[in-house]
Image (spheres, helix red, strand yellow):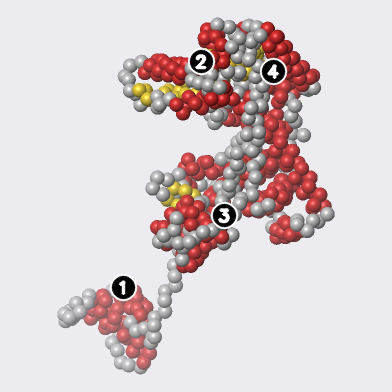
Amino acid sequence: MTGLPETAANVSPLVTAGALLLGSLLGKDLGLPFPTVSAILEATGASRSRAYELCGALRALLPTLQRPPGRPAAPSPEPAPSLPQTEQITRAALDFVMRHPGCVHTGRKRTHYGHVYRRFVLELRERHADIELDDFAVATRVPLGTLKDWLRVPAVPAPSEPTDGVASKVTPEPADATSTYVETVVTAWSTWHGSFSDFCQHLWEHWRVPLGRTSIASILAAHGVRFPRRRAGRSPDELALCGAFETFFPGAQWQGDGSPITVTVGGEPFTFNLELMVDSASGAFVGISVRDTEDSAAIVESFNDGVTTTTEPPLALLLDNRPSNHTPEVDAALGDTLRMRATPKRPQNKPHCEGGFGLFQQTVPLLNIELRRGIREAARQLLVLVSQTFFRAMNGRPRPDREGRSRIELYADKPTPEQIQQAHLALQERQRQQELARQTLDARQRPEVRALLDAAFESLALIDPERHIRLAIARYPLDAIVDGIAIFEAKVNALTLPEGADARYLLGIVRNLSEQRERELITEALLRRRVAVYDRFLAELVVARDKVARANPDPKHLVPHFTDRALAAERQIDRFFWLTAATDLISTMTLDERKALFRVAACLINATHHVPHRDRLDAIRFLADRVVPLS
């Protein structure tokens, strides 16, 4: 077999055979002379099947050797790979933050989240409920603890006293602000979704606006886009009550009260209760006691100290309504001394004690001692010495309002037998009237309510030896009592009960709930009356509600929408309208569906931080009372 000459391309005989076969096929179509297949195979030494296989491959490559004129066609795009679910969540969160500047603000110590971002994260969680909460927190860059707080349905504490929610307008005085700065402030606020403090920081750092917080607030108030809230002022009747306390003579009536005093020793703070006995007529400080807590033993100890100081007990002792002040131990220590109750929530009933504590706090230096051994006992002894020194000095200080006479001199004045008899009869009559009022109140109570309160007081370990507080609570509606007990128990379990809170705190919760319930029923009745007559103020709301319901009647859509409208309402009646619309819709469903929708609405309300905390809690309790009514 004759070998082929070596070519510059250094092509194998098999490829050469394939190329010659392709040439013979193309030449045959054009009528050109070309070697036969047998001659090509014999000359190259290639096998027939492999040569034809390479011939087909070369023929398929021919169209690619020359492209048509013009830009080559773009290859068809490959389908984008499906992103992991966590990455989709992260991208969605990033897009939201870019569209809502200020909704997430990272400071030097912590990150602040605007209510719009909280709402977005809650909605995102609803769409990706199958993702583990830990992975969801990592994807949204929200700490797991913070995310759990957003998703938790809060316990409803007692509503606070109603305040005047009308914010007074601020008179703007942006004297140093140019028109450019004013326009910048107003424009930036229109797209801002964070707090006012973060907004000021945003203006200083990113917009270089050289204005203070007051000037920025004035600009926003002048344009009617933000008004700061004002706190309610001091009660105007405090001066009118001055001098209204009835006194008889020194030694006729004492007042007892306690106050926490903190002593720092060796850098560690210790808090003790300073129990004080003060004579009402002379203002003399007759007895003190220093103990860990304000309890019956503190009353007994300070009372005995006062008897030691003055050599005889008073006719009556005025104490506040703390249950530990009215126990059999206290009555045994008082003996023939009448135990009187102060009017609840009126510090003016014990002005001498309150004034003594105020002078003490203003006069004594900072109680701070550095020691290494026995620091607690040393702190207690120090407080005993300081308080004794102070009050003994006060007893000997001349009083300008008493013609320069000191408390000791005033207390030394001996009353006549007629004065003693008159004061004793007056105090006995006052005590008798209090007891008759308590018995009358006791007779009005329902047995089942009293049994409920007895069981609750026993389980919560609340002290009420004379049943005064239980009788006061039993006057309120059953709904308020049941809700108040539940709230108090929840605070105990959550360790959020204020220090020193007792049965009176439960009474305050029940009272606030009853008053709040009354206001809600009045508002709801007025609202339904207005809807019935198609009041012109509510016509737009009715149209908006019906329009949304027709567009998407799904309750899972309507309840969050109604909740959003309620929280965005500026008028209270508008808020009650949308909350009522939500509750009317929820009440038509099964119990499990009602629970699920209530939880969704409660989470949305809890995440709307631009609404005051008290208003959010009122809205949640409004829904709870109507989703699962007790009667």
How far apart marks 3 and 1 lie (CA) works out to 95 Å
Nearer the camera: disc 4 or disc 2 = 2
The residue where tag 3 is placed is 170
What residue is shown with label 1?
50
**Dot 2: within a 10 Å radius of its alpha carbon, few (fewer than 14), some, or many (20 or more) residues?**
many
Answer few, some or many: residues within 10 Å of disc 1's Cα (few below 14, many 20 plus, some between 14 and 19).
few
Q: Residues within 10 Å of mark 4 (few under 14, many from 20)?
A: some
Which one is earlier in the sequence, the residue at label 3 or at label 1? 1
Instruction: Provide the residue designation for mark 4.
Output: 467
Tag 2, which secondary structure? strand
Q: Amino acid at mark 1?
A: Arg
Q: Earlier in the sequence, mark 3 or mark 4?
A: 3
Q: Which mark is residue 288?
A: 2
Task: Tell which tag, 3 or 1, sits nearer the viewer.
Answer: 3
Q: Earlier in the sequence, mark 4 or mark 1?
A: 1
| Disc 2 and disc 1 in contact, CB within 8 angstroms | no
Q: CA–CA distance between discs 4 and 1? A: 109 Å
Q: Which marked residue is nearer to the observer: mark 2 or mark 1? A: 2
Q: Amino acid at mark 3?
A: Val
Residues 251 and 124: in front is: 251
Identify the residue at horizontal 36%, vertical 92% (top origin). Answer: 30
Residue 391 position within the rendered picture, expressed as x and y whole percent measured from the top left: 48, 18
Q: Amino acid at mark 4?
A: Arg
Q: Considering depth in this image, is 254 or 120 the residue closer to the camera?
A: 254
